[in-house]
Amino acid sequence: VLLIAGCFSAVSWQWRVGGMAFGVILLLFVFFSKEALGVADGVIIVVCGIAFGLYETVLCCFLATVYTCGYALFLLLRKKAGRKTRIPFLPFYLLGYITLRVAQSLLGRFG
């Protein structure tokens, strides 16, 4: 579905290849870090890189990391989780994507 949706976006093939390369680098990180990030997370990021390009993929990953860190800090401060607790990344990636789309629509409307 992501690839089909991405085909209708105005992203050049160079940015799509860059997004795929970024996703593949993250996927390699998954394998070499003993799955610190899940394999499914890495595969989805590769697909998003192909569908939406390098810029949006990197920005979504950055926003997802910020949101994940905030949630982890919240859990640590409330003593609901420890340092070894695993937190799923994809829900925060979706939140980053939604944030990016809302910001683009607001800036497009007012900028």
Image: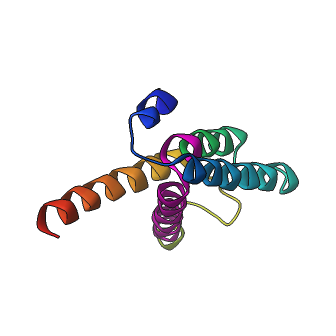
Which color scheme is applied?
Answer: rainbow
Q: Quadrant of the C terminus?
A: bottom left
Q: Out of 41 and 19, give the one closest to the viewer.
A: 19
Residue drawn at point x = 58 percent, y = 61 percent: 81
Query: Residue 23: image x %, image y %?
Result: 67, 50
Left or right placement of residue 14 versus residue 11 in this view: right
Q: Residue at x 34, y 50 (%)?
A: 98
Q: Is residue 53 magenta?
A: yes
**Residue 22 visible at all:** yes
Q: Is residue 46 above or below residue 59?
A: above
Any part of residue 88 in sight: no
Residue 72 position, x and y percent, is: 53, 65
Residue at 87%, 54% (x, y): give it: 32
Task: List x then y, in percent, for residue 19.
Answer: 60, 52
Q: Is residue 4 magenta?
A: no
**Above or below — where is 27 with respect to 47?**
below
Is the magenta region chiefly helix, strand or loop?
helix
**Residue at (68%, 66%) from the top-left corner?**
83
The answer to which of 29 and 82 lies nearer the viewer is: 29
Magenta residues (range) = 49-75
